[in-house]
């Protein structure tokens, strides 16, 4: 070691405290070096090799940084002042971070302290209701159900309205497990694409709401951006374990009040049926048969290790969620390793974030497109309560729910790997000048296998299934690769700063796999069916190996036909020679493999003048392979200005924050537009199995009506906001107004016939307008009190949506059920909001019990809530803390498709069970239950969504434990609503192919999976 | 020094990574579909035979369902209607307006049929296009299928949009008038007759696809209706002579009337079937049958909807309220299975008109779901407010031959025979016409008729050809589609505008060359 001058090294230690006692996680570094540490849970730190001339810097989020010269001291205890500017909270934005105080755009951040807790299956649930202007709709109570997030309204008609998710800087590709195919009782949507992330691993979630914040993501930013940051290993120096476990108990929060056996038989008689014929002598509560109370658990163990030049964090998690409907569950095993390394005097930072997860899901036989017999829940609501609950005792042509449970199965396994590597290097690093280059590589691969089967022993489940069995396999491999390069330059002048960012991004999305279907099995067992179909597919694949590529193959017992259809080098069709399988009498398998690419160039400039005037401008040019060569690129600019008025001398000291923000930007959308719609492509049509097991050899034809003029859907958005803080930000408030216009709407519209397909993609010359206001307020009731803390926050947002300049009227909102084929409840038309109800005005029943009113019209109601609000409060008394969260929505209507399909006099007249109100409604047993306002209900609700009661134990120094915390969490505690169904916060969606005119649905409640009420006992240990 | 090296290496790594990926051209690859060589334009179909297979498969689907074409061609007539039974078959009124003749341009089946059959026309045009290099036989079959598809658009809507294969979505297709479409169809059929293989009776493999016989059959049908299409009313003599010659040519291929009416609709070969498709006949059967009428392959039973009017049922010989075997009815009215002939292998299913008490295969009387005796009635309270038992059901295909057989007849010689007879009738040769009708009736074990008229001819076609997609076309040809029938909306009676369906409102929006039909 070389010594220049007189120097000596020593070890320095001490304790860092704050207002509330010891402060853990404070960064302590020797200024100008990489030598540093973090305080442990008791606020203690130790640093070796500290020179006498060294200056120690103590910093922690939310506290004023302190610098202390070491001199000869070996013990340095520090008291950190809380930073009055609590708004200096760091928020992650696109390609960087900022603080709430310095943000020019509308950005909201929620950190892990404020997350919802309990049985959380997916990341979006963490922030449900927490952010103004973000509507989170959990459409189903199923474990792993998809959650729709709408940021500042619904911009697009058809395209995906979900925001872009960016996990640790990597934009996710939107890969989702496969949708449920129809194996006898209708299709269903796919489950949640974010279910691969362990919510315990998430450190913070930022929501970028306005175009100035999202335009840096250009074509993917139109629906807002949700930035998810996972936990890193930063913490005290050395290693630390954290162990979390929770045990949850779930019960269905609500159920229908159906007729019991005696009341049912009375009702059958009342409507002219025969009591004796319908009395099967049992007393079965069918809702009890298909639902259950269930225990779930969630455990994770993580280890942090923080050393002088880096940190590492590893997590292992296991979650087992059991749904409140039989045969529904989700098990997730996940592992995560986050590693940071500083090199070359901190000039270089390397980071790796990797997740590996394996999710098993079990889906019950529920469907958004079930026909007259219903799905499992529909069957349970209508089943005769005097039937036996023995699955093999089936009466007549109706579905016995127990039979359906026993003889259907749908299992999905999804493995996902997400690895993100980044390296940045400071080419220039002075006090006023910093130039950093960064390379990010991302790799995201997801393999999903969904196996569905309806056994031949099932009864009344679809045509041709009984006695034969019907099964399906969907095998999908989705791979996305990302490469991004950015260069940032920070320059400080005396009274201004400049931050410039330039970058390039490339991402591809490769999607391949196969769909297979089988019919005619020689086993009752669904596991065996899945094996038989899978092994048949693999045997034929083996047989065809080396014969060249193929798109599909299949065979059928009736007619004894078989085929192998090949596309390359030239299309050809030949019989499948030399294959005989008696385990699956008819089957087909159809393969796909395609890749889309996105390439982008982007730049952003932030200029701050006198720490008062903030300017931001961004531009992104996005090129997509989904468009023809003339329209591949779209340019998405944005600009924003913020004025920190509180920095002006004319503002008094009492106003700690006053900032005005103005923003404008254009963002794009290409989601929902599939692969290769701009070009004429041919492919063999998808095969199918007919009711008698026959499989016709598919022919080849155009996939779509090519539209070379397709281009980006564009949203122009304008926003104005004010951030306000009083008394050192004891009271803070944020107010925003916005207006956005979406044009060039990508919509699958009807082609002018004759055309190769009935629909084609077009940029529609119409407008979707969203405008609204958002307001958030936080207040600290008690500060400077060591025993008590109390704060509360409230957010509310109002959004109006309307379509303009649209000449057509497109029916949407499919209604399903008995006598409801071809029925719909909504129409897409100009001067109406999206999802506007178009219904008969129901005016009661006439003297014959027939409904009055047969004129379908717009009824002035929409399924989109205008108002969303949330109220959150935290109370702490000594070691106890309590968090409560309430949320509500209003200004929308829900169509009770469940009641329309099942709870009518026509049902009880056919000896199908109903709710008691049906018997006295005045409706005749032979009346038609047409789609009408009779089943349209106000969806307004107020929900006690969540509470957490926690206790932190006092620990002695020699316990070996740093933290012991117990929590009791309740979710969905109560619901106040006039809605007569189970829950108004729903939207039942069939799979894409079953949507009327390809339009999504909202606000339609058709036998939705009931939301559970959940209580969770949790333990958090740090040691 | 060492640091500088590393710095340089780092910079190089960054730079090379940039160069490595550099900029992509964003072109998608031909990995699971074949791209047209000219990009977005049309360069011929990739595989004409495969494309023809796809067209045949699509058309099978379009002929199979109870909706769309079947609904427009049959449910709009007195032969088939769908009463709403409590909540069942309300379906937003979509069936009722067809029977009442109060449909609108936004009717979903009016739209679907338009889309489906126009799409068939376009797919056929792509195969026919010289750039596809299709073989002569493929072209001939595609022309037949295009003619069949265009026939439906012309017949239902009175005008036919036409798009060339290389016209993209930015082009609004030109529109053929009914007369132009008529000429177009005849030209296609002449080309098809020249290029298709000869037909042959008693051959399921041959008659599954187009032959000279099926093309001749369609041409005869188009010619017989030529007066409707031209607006002249009755067909002219030249057309009628050609109808006769075409039917004779069909007969020359061996097609002939065959005894055993309901056996023709089984999937075994017969001398009458000229063209059949592998469309399942499940809809034709289960649509009318009750939930409790079941088959081992369909334990859920029927779907309890479709019925026929009593006035249609009364066209057949036999007692009005009973149709059990031996009741003295004519063969084509079929019979209801009762304990005397119920058997495990017929599952209780008879043929033809189903009225009165229904039984299962064990001869036990069936009940409805509320446990009332399952007695199908002649009378109905109306189009709504029905219980599960009202209305007579029709079984041209029967579940006793399989629950979901895939064999549906589209063209059949008895129809050709009656077309020829009708041609003689229009020509004024009533005696020949009457003889031919009685020739058929003799084979069907029906009493000979003493006289003939257009109305009697229409009734005979009804008795022979119910559920075979011809009732609407026939009624219009004889000017009786606008007549009053039970539950028809009084305001629609006599409204000749109803002889054409409206152009769907979505189609009007998408193509400004289309003009809405009068009255809509």
Image (cartoon, coloured by chain):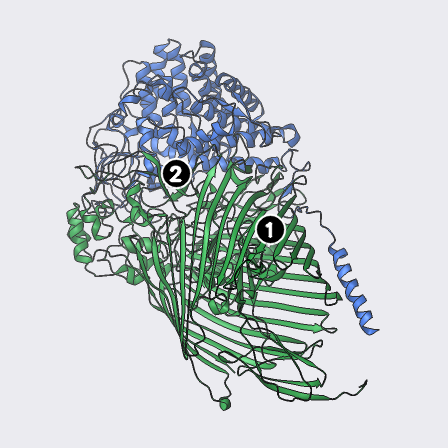
Chain colours: A green, B blue
- The spot of residue A60 in percent (x, y) is 58, 74
Distance of label 2 from label 1 (alpha carbons) = 65 Å
**Is residue B447 or residue A67 the one in the foreground?**
A67
Residue B268 is at least partly visible in this image: no
Residue A358 is at least partly visible in this image: yes
Q: Residue furthest bottom?
A: A958
- The spot of residue A542 in percent (x, y) is 60, 57
- Point out the frontmost of discs 2 and 1: 1
SS at badge 1: strand
Horizontal side of residue B134 vs A200, given as left or right? right
Tags 2 and 1 touching, CB below 8 Å: no
Q: Quadrant of the N terminus of chain B?
A: bottom right
The residue identified by callout 2 is B281
**Is residue A962 or residue A921 the one in the foreground?**
A962
The residue identified by callout 1 is A640
Q: Which image quadrant is residue B98 in?
A: top left
- In the rendered view, tell whether residue B122 sits above or below residue B179: below
Count of labels in the image: 2
């Amino acid at each position: 070691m070389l010594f220049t001058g007189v120097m000596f090294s020593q070890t320095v230690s001490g304790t860092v405290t704050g207002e509330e006692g010891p402060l853990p996680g404070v960064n302590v570094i020797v200024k100008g070096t990489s030598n540093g540490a973090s305080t442990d849970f008791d606020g203690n730190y130790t640093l070796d090799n500290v020179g006498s001339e060294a200056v120690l810097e103590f910093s922690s989020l939310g506290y004023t940084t302190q610098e202390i010269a070491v001199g000869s001291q070996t013990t340095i205890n520090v008291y950190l002042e809380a930073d009055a500017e609590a708004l200096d909270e760091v928020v992650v934005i696109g390609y960087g971070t900022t603080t709430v105080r310095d943000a020019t755009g509308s950005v909201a951040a929620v950190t892990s302290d404020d997350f919802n807790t309990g049985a959380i299956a997916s990341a979006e649930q963490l922030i449900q209701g927490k952010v103004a202007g973000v509507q989170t709709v959990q459409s189903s109570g199923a474990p792993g159900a998809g959650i729709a997030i709408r940021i500042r309204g619904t911009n697009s008609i058809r395209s995906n309205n979900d925001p872009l998710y960016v996990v640790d800087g990597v934009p996710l590709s939107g890969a989702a497990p496969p949708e449920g195919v129809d194996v006898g009782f209708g299709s269903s949507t796919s489950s949640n694409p974010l279910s691969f992330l362990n919510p315990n691993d998430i450190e913070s979630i930022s929501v970028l709401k306005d175009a100035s914040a999202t335009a840096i993501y250009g074509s993917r930013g139109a629906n807002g951006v949700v930035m998810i940051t996972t936990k890193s290993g930063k913490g005290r120096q050395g290693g630390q374990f954290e162990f979390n476990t929770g045990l949850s108990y779930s019960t269905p929060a609500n159920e229908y009040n159906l007729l019991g056996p005696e009341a049912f038989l009375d009702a059958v008689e009342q409507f002219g049926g025969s009591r004796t014929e319908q009395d099967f002598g049992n007393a079965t509560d069918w809702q009890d048969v298909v639902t259950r109370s269930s225990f779930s658990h969630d455990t994770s163990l993580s280890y942090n290790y923080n050393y002088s030049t880096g940190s590492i964090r590893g997590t292992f998690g296991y979650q087992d969620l059991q749904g409140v409907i039989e045969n529904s569950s989700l098990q997730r095993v996940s592992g995560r390793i986050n590693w940071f390394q500083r090199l070359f005097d901190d000039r270089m930072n390397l980071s790796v974030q990797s997740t590996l997860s394996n999710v098993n899901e079990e889906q019950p036989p529920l469907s958004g497109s079930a026909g007259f017999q219903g799905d499992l829940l529909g069957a349970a609501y209508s089943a005769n309560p005097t039937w036996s609950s023995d699955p093999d005792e089936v009466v007549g042509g109706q579905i016995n729910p127990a039979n359906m449970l026993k003889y259907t199965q749908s299992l999905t396994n999804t493995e996902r790997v997400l690895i993100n590597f980044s390296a940045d290097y400071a080419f220039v690093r002075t006090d006023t000048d910093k130039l950093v280059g960064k390379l990010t590589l991302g790799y995201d691969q997801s393999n999903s296998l969904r196996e569905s089967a309806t056994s031949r022993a099932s009864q009344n489940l679809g045509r041709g299934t009984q006695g034969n069995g019907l099964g399906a396999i969907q095998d999908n491999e989705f791979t996305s690769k990302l490469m991004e390069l950015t260069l940032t330059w920070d320059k400080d002048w005396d009274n201004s700063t400049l931050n410039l960012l330039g970058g390039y991004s490339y991402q591809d999305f490769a999607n391949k796999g196969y769909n297979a279907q089988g019919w005619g099995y020689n086993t009752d067992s669904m596991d065996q069916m899945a094996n038989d179909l899978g092994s048949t597919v693999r045997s034929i694949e083996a047989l065809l190996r080396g014969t060249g590529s193929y798109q599909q193959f299949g065979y059928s017992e009736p007619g004894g036909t078989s085929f192998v259809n090949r596309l390359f080098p030239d299309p050809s069709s030949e019989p499948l020679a030399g294959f005989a399988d008696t385990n699956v009498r008819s089957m087909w398998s159809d393969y796909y493999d395609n890749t889309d690419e996105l390439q982008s160039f982007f730049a952003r400039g932030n200029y701050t003048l006198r720490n008062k005037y903030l300017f931001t401008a961004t531009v992104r040019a996005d090129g997509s392979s989904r468009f023809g060569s003339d329209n591949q690129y779209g340019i998405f600019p944005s600009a924003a200005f913020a004025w920190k008025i509180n920095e002006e001398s004319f503002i008094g000291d009492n106003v700690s924050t006053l900032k005005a923000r103005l923003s404008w930007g254009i963002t794009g959308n290409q989601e929902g537009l599939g692969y290769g719609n701009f070009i004429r492509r041919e492919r063999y049509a998808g095969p199918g199995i007919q009711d008698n097991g026959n499989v016709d050899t598919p022919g080849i034809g155009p996939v779509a009506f090519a539209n070379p003029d397709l281009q980006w859907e564009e949203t122009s958005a304008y926003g104005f906001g004010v951030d306000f803080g009083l008394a050192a930000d004891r009271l803070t408030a944020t107010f925003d107004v916005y207006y956005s216009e979406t044009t060039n709407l990508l919509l699958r519209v009807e082609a002018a016939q004759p055309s190769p397909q009935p629909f084609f993609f077009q940029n529609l010359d119409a407008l979707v307008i969203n405008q609204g206001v958002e307001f958030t307020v936080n207040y600290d009731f008690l500060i400077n009190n060591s025993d008590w803390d109390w704060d509360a926050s409230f957010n509310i947002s109002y959004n109006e949506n309307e379509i303009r300049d649209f000449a057509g009227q497109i029916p949407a909102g499919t209604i399903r059920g008995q006598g409801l084929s071809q029925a719909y409840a909504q129409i897409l038309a100009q001067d109406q909001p999206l999802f506007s109800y178009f219904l008969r005005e129901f005016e009661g029943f006439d003297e014959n019990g027939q409904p009055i009113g047969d004129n379908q019209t717009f009824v002035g109601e929409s399924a989109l809530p205008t108002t969303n609000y949330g109220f959150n409060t935290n109370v702490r008394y000594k070691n106890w803390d309590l968090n409560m969260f309430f949320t509500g929505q209003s200004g929308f209507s829900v169509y009770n498709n469940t009641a329309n399909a099942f709870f009518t006099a026509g049902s009880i007249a056919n000896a199908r069970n109903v709710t008691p109100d049906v018997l006295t409604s005045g409706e005749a047993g032979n009346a038609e239950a047409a789609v009408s306002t009779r089943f349209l209900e106000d969806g307004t609700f107020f929900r006690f969504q969540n509470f957490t009661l926690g206790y932190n134990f006092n620990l002695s120094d020699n316990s070996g434990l740093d933290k012991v915390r117990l929590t009791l969490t309740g979710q969905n505690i109560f619901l106040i609503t006039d809605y007569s169904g189970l829950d108004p916060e729903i939207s039942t969606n069939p799979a894409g192919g079953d949507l009327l005119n390809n339009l999504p649905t909202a606000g339609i409640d058709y036998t939705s999976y009931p939301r559970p009420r959940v209580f969770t006992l949790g333990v958090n240990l740090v040691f | 020094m060492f640091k500088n090296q590393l710095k340089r290496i780092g910079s190089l790594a960054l730079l090379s990574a940039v160069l490595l990926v550099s900029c992509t051209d964003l072109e998608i690859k031909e990995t699971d579909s074949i791209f047209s060589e000219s990009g977005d334009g049309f360069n011929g179909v990739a595989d004409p035979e495969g494309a023809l297979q796809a067209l045949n498969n699509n058309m099978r689907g379009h002929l199979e369902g109870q909706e769309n074409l079947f609904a427009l061609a049959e449910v709009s007539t007195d032969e088939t209607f769908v009463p709403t039974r409590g909540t069942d078959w309300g379906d937003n009124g979509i069936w009722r307006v067809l029977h009442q003749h109060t449909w609108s341009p936004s009717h979903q089946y009016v739209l679907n049929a338009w889309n489906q059959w126009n799409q068939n026309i376009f797919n056929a045009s792509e195969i026919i296009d010289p750039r596809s290099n299709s073989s002569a036989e493929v072209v001939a079959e595609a022309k037949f299928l295009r003619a069949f598809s265009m026939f439906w658009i012309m017949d239902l809507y009175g005008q036919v949009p036409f798009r060339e294969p290389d016209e993209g979505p930015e082009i609004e297709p030109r529109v053929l008038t009914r007369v132009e479409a008529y000429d177009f169809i005849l030209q296609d059929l002449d080309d098809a007759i020249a290029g298709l293989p000869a037909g042959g009776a008693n051959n399921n493999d041959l008659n599954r696809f187009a032959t000279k016989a099926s093309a001749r059959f369609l041409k005869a049908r188009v010619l017989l209706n030529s007066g409707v299409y031209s607006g002249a009313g009755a067909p002219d003599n030249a057309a009628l002579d050609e109808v006769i010659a075409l039917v004779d040519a069909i007969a020359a291929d061996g097609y002939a009337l065959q005894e055993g009416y309901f056996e023709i609709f089984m999937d075994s070969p017969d001398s009458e079937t000229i063209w059949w498709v592998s469309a399942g006949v499940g809809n034709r059967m289960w649509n009318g049958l009750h939930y409790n009428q079941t088959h081992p392959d369909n334990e859920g039973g029927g779907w309890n909807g479709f019925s026929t009017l009593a006035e249609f049922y009364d066209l057949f010989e036999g007692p009005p309220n009973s149709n059990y075997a031996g009741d003295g009815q004519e063969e084509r009215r079929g019979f209801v299975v009762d304990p005397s002939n119920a058997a495990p292998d017929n599952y209780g299913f008879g043929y033809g008109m189903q009225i009165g008490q229904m039984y299962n295969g064990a001869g036990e009387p069936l009940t409805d779901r509320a446990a009332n005796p399952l007695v199908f009635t002649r009378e109905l309270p109306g189009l709504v407010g029905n219980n599960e038992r009202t209305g007579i059901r029709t079984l041209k295909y029967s579940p006793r031959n399989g629950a979901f057989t895939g064999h549906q007849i589209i063209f059949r010689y008895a129809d050709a025979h009656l077309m020829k007879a009708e041609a003689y009738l229009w020509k004024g040769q009533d005696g020949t016409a009457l003889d031919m009708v009685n020739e058929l009736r003799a084979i069907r074990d029906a009493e000979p008729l003493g006289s003939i008229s257009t109305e009697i001819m229409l009734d005979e076609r009804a008795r022979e050809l119910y559920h075979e997609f011809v009732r609407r076309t026939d009624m219009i040809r004889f000017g009786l589609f606008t007549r009053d029938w039970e539950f028809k909306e009084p305001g629609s009676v006599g409204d000749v505008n109803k002889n054409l369906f409206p152009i769907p409102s979505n189609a009007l929006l998408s193509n400004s060359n289309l003009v809405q039909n009068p009255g809509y």
